[in-house]
Amino acid sequence: MTATPALTAPLGLLAELTHRCPLGCPYCSNPIALDQRSSELDTAAWARVFREAAGLGVLQVHLSGGEPAARRDLEDIVKAARDAGLYSNLITSAVGVTTERLQALADAGLDHVQISIQDSDQQSADHIAGYRGATARKRALAAEVVRLGLPLTVNVVVHRANIGRVEAMVDLARGLGAGRVEIAHVQYYGWALKNRAALMPSREQVELAVADVERLREKHHGRIVIDAVVPDYYARFPKPCVGGWGRRSLNVTPAGKVLPCHAAEVIPDLEFWNVREHSLGDIWRSSPAFNAFRGTDWMQEPCRSCALKDKDFGGCRCQAFLIAGDARAADPVCHLSPHHSLVADLAAIREDVPYSYRHS
Ligand code: FES
């Protein structure tokens, strides 16, 4: 007998306002084929999406990209989020956000800012970003965020080139006035897959970094929150990717497609609905893509009989497809997966080759 999974309310909406971005980060997880500016949703469409999201129970909207500041109507979009009653978080590279622009965004009701940092070492950071002078702009914007009294999170994507400087990066985040720092190991989706061998750290590096995070959490307890996104390829258990498919969050692409996760388009034959043709509520409840991996009925062994299946939800569907070739398979990161050895094989491929930068 198949049980219909109970529908939970989504809590977060990732609004990918544009794929345009001034940086060229080799670990970009956006898809290889980017949405063009001419296909982007307009302000009114985003305002409607935000109202519908709030009606569904969404509490937070993450204004992301690309670089959201590439949108001239970003202030109106922020105001629309505020009018809908959503807590808004601007996820920015800081490049292209002037002091005046930040003030205007704060006036429009922006609640929180997240700035990405590529490294604590300035030369390395600019090299990773593929943009000379990026670090100076990030520091300047962080100072403005703090001056305006907005909460600040610093996000650092960790990989072979910077993984030995976790402590320095946490110190940098503290120095910038962040209340939270995310140490996020690269997730190999989208463009990042092109650079996997150049980005992949060794197991020893990962183990040291994980230990660093634990030590730094104790050291800085009460002063800064340290979030960590696990380094998948050296794990024994998979992460509960996106909190479970179709359970907690939605992604809306610049062109209006609604995805259960950021990378979902890598899975062939999924049918994604678009906010131009459907309400967000309809999409959440009824779109084929959202229902494809809800609950546990879609699972195969070893997930089907696993005691953890309601905790990790079989891991990441996108990774299962990319590595095992089957989106219904257990995430190969899991040591019980028959494909687990493939993950170790991929992690062993590490090459000091120049990055393939992303230019959008
Ligand atoms: Fe798609 Fe994990 S990134 S389910």
Image (cartoon, grey):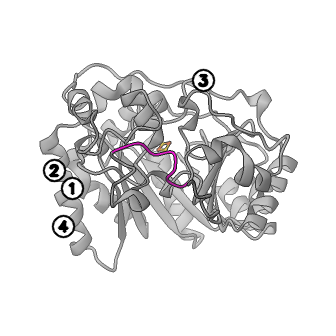
Mark linked to residue 215: 4
Q: Earlier in the sequence, mark 1 or mark 3?
A: 3
Q: Considering the image in quadrants, where does the N terminus appear?
A: bottom right
Residue bearing mark 3 = 33
Type of residue at label 1?
Answer: Val
Does the residue tagged 1 have its C-beta within 8 Å of any atom of ligand 1? no
Type of residue at label 2?
Answer: Glu
Residue 318 in the image: state x and y as whole percent.
47, 37
Classify residue 291 as left or right of residue 222.
right
User: Is 135 drawn above or below residue 195 in the view shown?
Assistant: below
Q: Earlier in the sequence, mark 4 or mark 3?
A: 3
| Mark in the foreground, 4 or 3 | 3
| Mark in the foreground, 4 or 1 | 1
Q: Secondary structure at mark 2?
A: helix
Mark linked to residue 101: none
Crowd class of label 1 (few under 14; some 14 to 19; many from 20; radius 10 Å): some
Q: Earlier in the sequence, mark 4 or mark 1?
A: 1
Q: Are marks 2 and 1 in contact (CB under 8 Å)?
A: yes
Classify residue 265 as left or right of residue 47.
left
Type of residue at label 4?
Answer: Arg
Q: Secondary structure at mark 3?
A: loop
Q: Main secondary structure of the magenta part?
A: loop
Mark linked to residue 207: 2
- The structure residue drawn at horizontal position 56% and vertical position 60%, both measured from the top left corner, is 113
